[in-house]
Amino acid sequence: MPKKPDQSQASAGPAPVPIYLISPSSAVPPDAPIDASLERMRAAGFAPVLDPGALRTAQRFAGSDAQRAGAFARAAAQPAHAVMITRGGYGLTRLLPSLDFRALARAGKAWIGYSDFTAFQLAMLARARAVTWAGPALLDDFATEDDAPADETTVGALHDALAGRLEIVGFRASGPSGVDVRGTLWGGNLTVLCSLIGTPWFPRVKGGILFLEDVGEHPYRIERMLTQLLHAGVLDAQGAVLIGHVNRYRLVERDAGFDMPGVIRRLRTLTKTPIITGLPMGHESPKLTLPHGATVGLATEGRTAYLVLDEHDH
């Protein structure tokens, strides 16, 4: 007689999505809520696996340069399709000369992260023409301060990206209406991006859609870096520039009215490239998961911007 199906299995939801976690930059602090963050990932429908070196410490880094570079080789060889960083910080630019980007691209992984991970994403685009994913990190997006679950939009965007369901995203924006461009989506953390100008790991993108975010940098420093991109010809070569979260800075009395909105207003007078603010990307929630290096469309209508992500690898 045939065995009746297990009712609990029949009603079970989709299988958790495996994600391999690496620490390629700064060390995970000893008091970081690792266990709670992993549990929130599981509750959000993921199956996280910590790399054996993810909790190492060497000075301010998550292991020596060789150990952190080794994490990429382990991540490329293990079975999970998705690879995410535990955190950003500093240290990835030290690894760039030792990484085989073409081999890492051939591994076919979905490399996910932001902040300091921008260095890896730019290098993968410059050296291997590979698509990676600008998206969340374990401790930034799953370590909430209370017992609340991870941000629903952030989690949903990550699931959609990994399942190949991410076709179009809209967000409230400020900037010119009527923009309609198509090009390579690229960028990331402004400080890290500027540090790679003139190196073999800086992509030469024309007609692209450049997105930028940063944290803890005073508006005058943001303006200085944006001016560097302007003088280097990077901004004028793009089809559009998207500005994400720029936060956690403190204005002082001597700023005398100098602020981030003023930086953006001035920049718009200096370049023909449309500058659009409001992209949900950076060091706060919600955070989209975007295909870095893919060809996408961008359109603005009134105070809404749309990214059409219909041609990407995942």
Image (tube, rainbow, N blue to C red):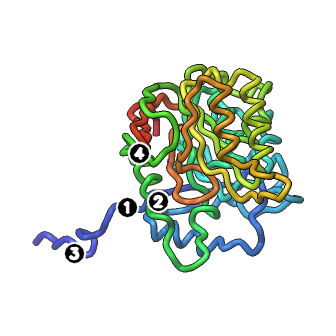
Question: Relative to the observer, which residue lies in front, 73 or 38?
Answer: 38
The N terminus, quarter of image: bottom left
Residue type, numbered disc 2 = Val
Q: Position of residue 122 (x, y in %)?
A: 67, 34
Question: Relative to the observer, which residue lies in front, 153 or 261?
Answer: 261
In the displayed structure, does residue 100 sit left or right of residue 146? Answer: right
Q: Earlier in the sequence, mark 2 or mark 1?
A: 1
**Label 4 Cα crowd, 10 Å radius (few <14 / some 14-19 / many 20+):** some
Residue type, numbered disc 3 = Gln
Secondary element at tag 2: helix
Q: Is residue 140 visible?
A: yes
Q: Pointer 4: what residue? A: 170
Q: For residue 222, what is the image quadrant? A: top right
Q: Pointer 3: what residue? A: 7
Q: Pointer 2: what residue? A: 155
Residue at mark 4 to residue at mark 2: CA–CA distance:
16 Å
